[in-house]
Amino acid sequence: MRLRLAPLAALCAAIALAAPPLPPPRRPKLILAIVVDQFRYDYLLRYRTDFTSGLKRLLDQGAVFDDAHYIHVPTVTAVGHSTILSGATPAMSGIVANEWYDRALGKNVTSVTDSNTRLLGAAAGAEGSSPRRMLVSTVGDEIKMSGQESKVIGVSIKDRSAILPAGHMADGAYWFDNKSGHWVTSTYYKDALPPWVEKFNATKPAAKATGADWLPFASKPGAKPFCNMDAVKGDVPKCRSLEASPWGNEMIEEFAEQALAAEKLGQHKGTDVLSVSFSSNDYVGHAMGPDSPEAHDITVRTDRVIGKLFDAIDKSVGMSNVVVFLTADHGVSPVPEVNRDRHMPGGRNISADLSKAIEDGLSARYGAGQWIVGREGWQPYFNLTLIASKKLDEAEVQRTAAAIVRRQPHVFAVFTNQQLLNGPMPGGPVAAGVQNGFYYGRSPDLTIIQDPFYLFSTATENSGTSHGTPFNYDTHVPVIFMGTGIKAGHYFQRVAVNDIAPTISAIVGVQEPSGSVGRVLQEMWQ
Ligand SMILES: [Zn+2]
């Protein structure tokens, strides 16, 4: 019998292999993109039992990709947000950092500030923001270009986090202006703030937090607050800002609900896109670190605000008509002092020392001068006029500076701009991440990677923590999809955040974005 069955089994296997792959789920009415700023993947594991609402629903009913990573350096907000709905690396998108030195302007520019635009809703004449520095399309752009009747809206406290996922053809991107306490947009999108946003601003959304104590979630009466929004009260410190409190995320969620209703999202002939980026987690995480009670608390509260947004969508569109995904723009490193106390590696480098070492070293070798004209973080842009006037070779000056940096403490790797352009590059994931993050003309002349768990600090900014490295604590983020036709469960194959955009494009049935380097995650089709 076994002998006779064997060919049959082989035949079945062959048929299974030849079977056409399943089609994507049916086209939804709405794509809901949820980004949580600085949400490490491991928060899903550490705080799983605290989730009762939105995150619980995603974990129970969604396709959870447990080993999803960014494949670029630096792992920061603008770059993450430019990746999520474009599928592009910075090498493709040109969004190489939160801000960089613009040689033509002779000053630093952010990923989105645009002197040709004005803010709407804030002080008259304030400079606005736009997606014009992003060189690639997003899923929203591709839906628009396909001719579908569709609306695309981006919402966040941070301008870059509202603008970059939504793309160039978005109907609107809205963010919070701390100075005026208003939600704003720019003249890139519209000539005037829409009436529904004016109405929301008239409710003074930021005033809710005035004087409030930030208490641990569901705490008993008499519990000690983390901070008070207005003042130091005894041993209770003053909260840093609205953005760095739970009310920041709550305000984002309320604004998203208003956008949903006023723009009738999910009620057009084509597929609409609503991108919502929760920013408060990043502000809290920077100040207090990923192991703090505050980070735990804002994570639990994030579960509740996402649940509230799902409830609103259930009422207006029905979640069965929505494909939702959740991810983060980057992770975060533990606070160096916390690591030191638990015998883990890590520490702080003073960035001014590094700049001085480079200036001194280049002056000693080639003669005095101001060798560094700009910086992206601690990474230098060299003075090309000085290099030309001394008839030096740009690549050689970069190599000399890189050798100086390599001799500094806790430097893991240094790459020169010329090396990234022409090689040779070493192998391995760190070099690949740096190459993926490099765009000539915007990236700094040296890309400097510190040892794992090390941070650059200044003499005054030397508490809290940060992110930006190629190491797993910064690259590993949640990627969860949920919707009709998506098979719930855990998927442990390694995937890239860049896979989200082509996957959503396949679900909506449009061209994948122009710079996407990801693949379609068709293993989750039902
Ligand atoms: Zn951050």
Image (spheres, grey):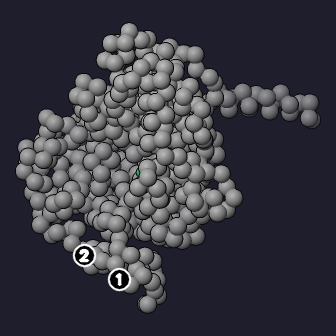
Disc 2 crowd, CA 10 A, few/some/many (<14, 14-19, 20+): few
**43 vs 375: above or below:** below
Q: Residue furthest top?
A: 391
Q: Nearer the viewer, mark 1 or mark 2?
A: 1
* Of the pair 396 and 194, the residue shown nearer to us: 396
For disc 1, the marked residue is 233
- Which amino acid type corresponds to the residue marked 2 in the rendered image? Thr
At which x and y percent is residue 9? 80, 33
Q: Residue furthest bottom?
A: 222
For disc 2, the marked residue is 210
Identified at 31% across, 65% down, the residue is 241
Q: Quadrant of the C terminus?
A: top right
Identified at 47% across, 69% down, the residue is 294
Disc 1 crowd, CA 10 A, few/some/many (<14, 14-19, 20+): few
Q: Taking 328 as reference, is 278 left or right?
A: left
At which x and y percent is residue 299? 47, 65
At which x and y percent is residue 251? 28, 65
* Of the pair 489 and 92, the residue shown nearer to us: 92
* Of the pair 28 and 121, the residue shown nearer to us: 121
- Which amino acid type corresponds to the residue marked 1 in the rendered image? Lys
Q: Quadrant of the N terminus?
A: top right
At which x and y percent is residue 204? 17, 69
* Contact between labelled residues 2 and 1, with CB atoms less than 8 Å apart: no
